[in-house]
Image (spheres, rainbow, N blue to C red):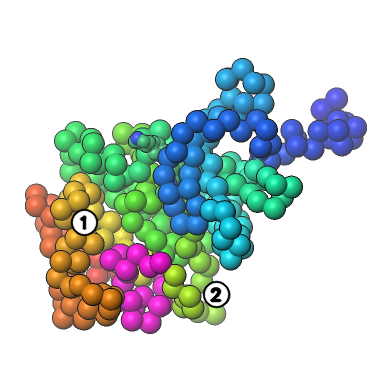
Amino acid sequence: VTQSPVWRALSPAQHDQTLFEERHLRYISPLGKGNFGSVELCRYDPLGDNTGELVAVKKLQPNKQSTLKDFQKEVNTLSVMHCDYIVKYRGVCYSMGRLSMSLVMEYLPYGSLIGYLESNGHKVNTRRLILFASQICKGMEYLQTLRYVHRDLAARNILVASESLVKIADFGLTKIIPSDKEYYRVTQPGESPIFWYAPESLNESKFSHKSDVWSFGVVLHELFSYCDMSSNPKREIGHIVQGPSISMHLANILKNNWRLPAPPKCPPKVCSQYLVQLYR
Ligand SMILES: C=CCCn1cc(-c2nc(Nc3ccc(C4CCNCC4)cc3)nc3[nH]ccc23)cn1
């Protein structure tokens, strides 16, 4: 019966597993803020008996029409990703008569890598940090096969699925590199996470797989300093330079070969700039 034309005509929503009806999406609690929106924990409970599954729902920040197009791009980007090291797309929920939409994703119970390392750092050894780093690499390798540059790879955008699995999330700044180029040039930089930016991104707004590798180097620094606030890239660099043209100062000190200091107890092979420069 469920394959009959009548059934499919009568229940298109049920048939389409990626369409979540707003009336069944029960808000539970806030999870965090990403690019272009906030993320909430919800239970999708069509039976109304609390047996529905938990999902993470990213809502577009209201009255920022310019980002509705960007948000739609983020939804489209995530919807084509099928990788164990990238947060899973579940679907979309339209509201206000399709005037607004939310992105529905799998809920990862341990939260962001920053929070996880801050509260569980004592039980995460070097071996586990290297496992997490290798999983982020595999996720980025997958992105590269699709010609995507993430442009915002940072520990804040890595989520912890279990004690031995992390996933890349928040594709709000992700761009696809044109087939005839090796980089993507941003016109309107917007709020830039400059402390994770490669020199060419700072100086020429150029983004490529190589600039994602640079950001991965900063993520390694975050991982091996257990995301300790006192050694946060913003703090490490921020206290060297101040003032409005901080990105120009940052570009200068990088040009003079200043680099983030190796975190204490970081294995030499991980912290060698050679490692990151090698892959650039
Ligand atoms: C990518 C980063 C920027 C945007 N962002 C995404 C999320 C997010 N979070 C979770 N889970 C989760 C998040 C926080 C906590 C905490 C733990 C400590 N106590 C308070 C609650 C626990 C679980 N699952 C997700 N799936 C897809 C997205 C997503 C959050 N922020």
As helix, strand or loop, the secondary structure at mark 1 comes to: loop
Q: Quadrant of residue 69?
A: bottom right
Q: Are marks 2 and 1 in contact (CB under 8 Å)?
A: no
Mark 1 beta carbon near ligand 1 (under 8 Å): no
Mark 2 beta carbon near ligand 1 (under 8 Å): no
Q: Residue at x 44, y 73 (%)?
A: 189
In the rendered structure, does residue 208 fall within the stretch colored magenta?
A: yes
- Quadrant in which ligand 1 is drawn: top left
**The C terminus is located in which quarter?**
bottom left
In the foreground, 183 or 98? 98
Left or right: where 233 falls relative to 55 = left
Left or right: where 46 falls relative to 80 = right
Residue extending farthest top = 49
Residue at numbered disc 1 = 232
Work out whether 274 lies above or below 36.
Answer: below
Q: Amino acid under label 1? A: Asn
Q: Mark 2 vs mark 1: which is more N-terminal?
A: 2
Nearer to us of marks 2 and 1 is 1
In the foreground, 199 or 190? 190
Q: Amino acid under label 2? A: Pro
**Where's residue 64, x and y in %?**
56, 61
Q: Quadrant of residue 252?
A: bottom left
Work out whether 180 lies above or below 274.
Answer: below
Q: Residue at x 31, y 44 (%)?
A: 113
In the foreground, 144 or 151? 151
Numbered circles on residues, count: 2
**Where's residue 87, x and y in %?**
47, 45
Work out whether 190 lies above or below 71.
Answer: below
Q: Magenta residues, as a range?
A: 191-209
